[in-house]
Amino acid sequence: MINETLKEYRILCFGGGGAEIAKELIRQKFDSEKIFYFDSELDDLNTISLKNKFQIGTFTTFGKGTKGKTDVSKKIFNEDNELFLRLTKSDSIYFLVGSLGGGLFSGLLPELAASLNARSKKYIVIGNLPFENEQKFQATNTTYAITNLNTYTSNVLLIKNSDVQRNNPSLTKAEIFDKVNKLLCSLIKEFVSHFDVSEVVNKDELIYISSLEDLIFTSKSYILEHLLGINNSENKVITADTNLEILELLKVQYEYVYRISPRRFEELVEYIYKLSGYKTELTKTSRDDGADVLVWTPPPVLGDSFLTVIQAKRYAKKKHVGSAEVRELMGSSQVFKADKAQLVTTSDFSRPAISTAKARKIDLIKFYELNETIKNFIA
Ligand SMILES: Nc1nc2c(ncn2[C@@H]2O[C@H](COP(=O)(O)OP(=O)(O)OP(=O)(O)O)[C@@H](O)[C@H]2O)c(=O)[nH]1
Ligand SMILES: [Mg+2]
């Protein structure tokens, strides 16, 4: 029953260190639906395959990092406030995860904490501190983050890189990071499973702003509170619906569609058809028949249902869909013995694509048109 309740958590990872921790979470088979990764650095975003990853601060850093500047993070936070609000709307427990020292996570943490506090959300900060001998700005950023964070929460658990190094003097730096990531993951795992950190983590490696016992107590009582609010068999654990949250966001800020992962985009397309009442299926990621979504139209009174295969292309604004993509979809339409094929994109279609599609009777759809039709379905 506890596990049922704990479906309600989200692990939000930030910045380069956050990406490494997220990768470890994925390796340890954490439910990837629960893992979110945010970064302004495209180079780091590209190293991880995750549905819930978001480019932030696009208009602040243009795909670069903050270069160690926490004030840049504040701008990023303001730019993407809407995204954070939407993704932290439900009454989940939020884990804010990353590595202090760099600009992004250090600068965002106090802003996120302030925002979560203002809306009475529950959260726990889990991360690591830079090595003692790292560059000066790392220490400055860390102090900035912790001092400001202190005014909002005492639910903070941090591991010091240097402590791990002292306890494991023979390890290389890369091995230390690996160890730190594993420690952080076990910390999260413990919280998610039974909220007892004492067994998995060597307490000497852990610094905590409040006492660990307090933290565990707080979290436990939250869980209990949460549990008491539901009656077991028919329990009302509402799993937050990320697709809906993102559609709501797109309703007010359409441009976000360029910052989500391609897989998330495929899901959104499927979701729209599902909301419209159709039977749908998302094809496996590994499958490469060129079809992402299958939609069955209900049969008119009697007869066979009508199958539409859909290919979803989350392309950058300027990258238009060409005739090759249309031909590929044609092929996959045959593989699936489909009655109809549609190509949905976030960008536009080239002239050859349009003429190829016309000859083959393939529908070319711009995502905003699809999104427009769905507006009626969401509050
Ligand atoms: N947990 C963890 N931390 C790491 C790893 N590799 C580097 N770091 C730490 O990450 C800290 C912060 O750097 P980043 O996370 O890259 O910084 P950022 O938050 O992305 O900020 P900017 O890149 O400056 O915008 C450094 O001080 C390193 O100690 C890793 O594999 N795991
Ligand atoms: Mg970075």
Image: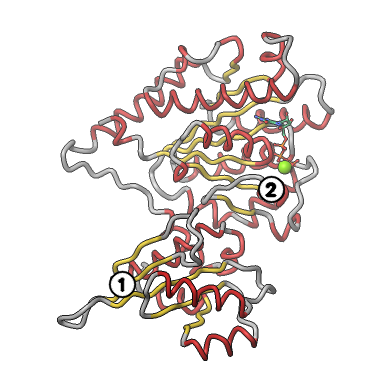
Where does residue 260 sit, x and y in percent of width and height?
A: 57, 58
Comparing 114 with 90, the one in front is 90
Q: Residue at x 65, y 76 (%)?
A: 320
Task: Give the residue type at disc 2.
Answer: Lys
Q: Ligand 2 lies in which image quarter?
A: top right
Name which quarter of the figure residue 129 lies in: top right
Q: Is residue 301 left or right of residue 150?
A: left
- Distance, label 2 to label 1, CA atoms, is 46 Å
Residue on which the image places disc 2: 74
Q: Residue at x 40, y 41 (%)?
A: 92
Q: Is residue 305 above or below residue 92?
A: below
Q: Quadrant of the N terminus?
A: top left
Residue under numbered circle 1 = 296
Q: Is residue 75 above or below residue 174?
A: below
Q: Residue at x 50, y 80 (%)?
A: 365
CB at mark 2 closer than 8 A to ligand 1?
A: no
Position above or below: 25 against 298: above
2 or 1: tag closer to the N-terminus: 2
User: Which residue is painted at 32% across and 72% down in the image?
Assistant: 276
**Residue 349 x/y as whole percent:** 61, 81
Name the kind of residue labelled 1 in the image.
Trp
Circle 2 SS class: helix
Q: Nearer the viewer, mark 2 or mark 1?
A: 1
x and y percentages locating residue 322 in the rendered image: 63, 78
- Spot occupied by residue 36 in the image (x, y as percentages of width and height): 53, 45
The quarter of the image holding the C terminus is bottom left
Residue 165 falls in image quadrant = top right
